[in-house]
Amino acid sequence: MNTPPSLLDALRATAGFVPQGEPVGNLTLAEGRFEGRAVLGAFIENRIASGSIGTKEVARLVPALRAARASRQPVVWFLDSAGARVSEGLAALGAFRELYRESLAAAGAGVPFAALLGRNCYGGASMIAHLAHRRLFSPHSQLAMSGPSVLAQAAGVSALDEMFRAMAEATLNAAARSKQSAANTTWAPGSDLAAWLRESTAPIEKPWGSFHRRHGELAARLPAPAAPRPPEAVKRKDLDRLYPEGYEIRDSLGFFRGTATVEGAAVPVLGLVGGGGVGAARSWQFADAAWNLAREGAGPLEVLLDCDVHAARLEDEKLVLTEYIVDMALALGALAARGHRVRLTILGKAGGGVYVALAAAAARVRSVHGADIQVLPGSAVASILGQSHEAICEFDDYRKAGVSDEEMRLGLVG
């Protein structure tokens, strides 16, 4: 009995992709031609470690993305991946920061990204997928910031709980995702890919404007907020030392916004500090403030982070949490493209997709002495690997991994 062709098989046939060199881990780079145009294929398959993306895959992808940006060559992604390779720890996080920086730059320069999805598309892989203007799901695809095991662990239930698994499946599957956005389509096996590929690889005019329109559409998905609580003035010892010339920052449930005086000039400040996992509403708040700054003249932006995880909740995943996390990265990318200097300071904890979203476009990442940067919190790592890989790291570890560029000692006592 013949096995029916997969979505990747159909893609390879449609554009005549030919591998360029040997596969590296889960990655195969390929060159194809579609309707007279050269296209780059970046195929992440589930060969090892759930299709995760590690340092070797990134080292091959980054120069390919730079070349595509220089030539405006369309990039066609196939993603069957659990995201960054958690077992590599900080090295994987630093590599993903570099990969996402290059991906943001390419997408912002107008390189068409098209994303086709295999069985799983979680975490960082889902963030790559949402730099594309269109996504094509396999019939059994699942897409989320958190995979089912992490969602179950966060909900306090067993990953084998049948009722929870059914709820998660109904939230993460291709049918549910296709209902959330016209940019999501589910592939019918055997159907022709040419029309979808033609539209998905068409030149992008004013890419940052297109991403900003997407930001506006995301607002409509959010539930009506409860009665707002007035923002509270922030007064912290670490900020006193960080901004000795003064600052006026207010906290709205973990979203910081205000100004700080730096070298005699008032500089805007945005931050995600405390407040639990970053969900869709807080991500949109942050992105909205950053998009508004992008309209102003170029200048520095101070970004503060003390939050190591995105929200692992089904209610956030129903909204497609990845799109909101990516919206923050896109807003900061638009600022950087317009000449703003984005400077990220990690005050305490950082990691995962939230870290990548804020660090990718940053010209400089600095961490306060004693900051705790991890690829994911220990509980999430344990649910993925079956054991925790927590370790106490020093700044030199962060610098070597590429997750922090400089350390700041604030001299706090007590």
Image (tube, helix red, strand yellow):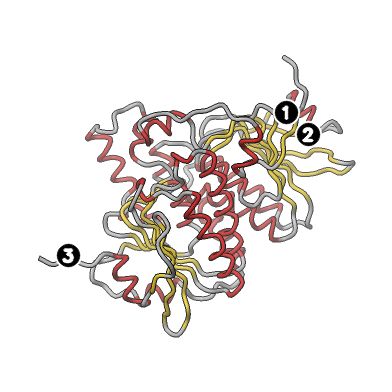
Q: Amino acid at mark 2?
A: Glu
Q: Dot 2 corresponds to which residue?
A: 248
Q: Residues within 10 Å of mark 3 (few under 14, many from 20)?
A: few
Which of the two discs, 1 and 2, labels the residue nearer the N terminus?
Answer: 1
Type of residue at label 1? Answer: Ala
Mark 1 sits on what residue? 233
Left/right placement of residue 329 relative to residue 51 reads: right
Q: Is residue 67 above or below residue 246?
A: below
In the rendered image, the quadrant that contains the C terminus is top right
Q: Position of residue 347 (x, y in %)?
A: 67, 31
Residue drawn at point x = 38 percent, y = 29 percent: 387
User: What is the CA distance from the residue labelled 3 to the residue labelled 1?
Assistant: 62 Å
**Which residue was labeled with disc 3?**
3
* Left or right, residue 95 beside residue 29: right
Residue lying furthest bottom: 36
Q: Earlier in the sequence, mark 3 or mark 2?
A: 3
The one of 72 and 21 positioned closer to us in this rendering = 21
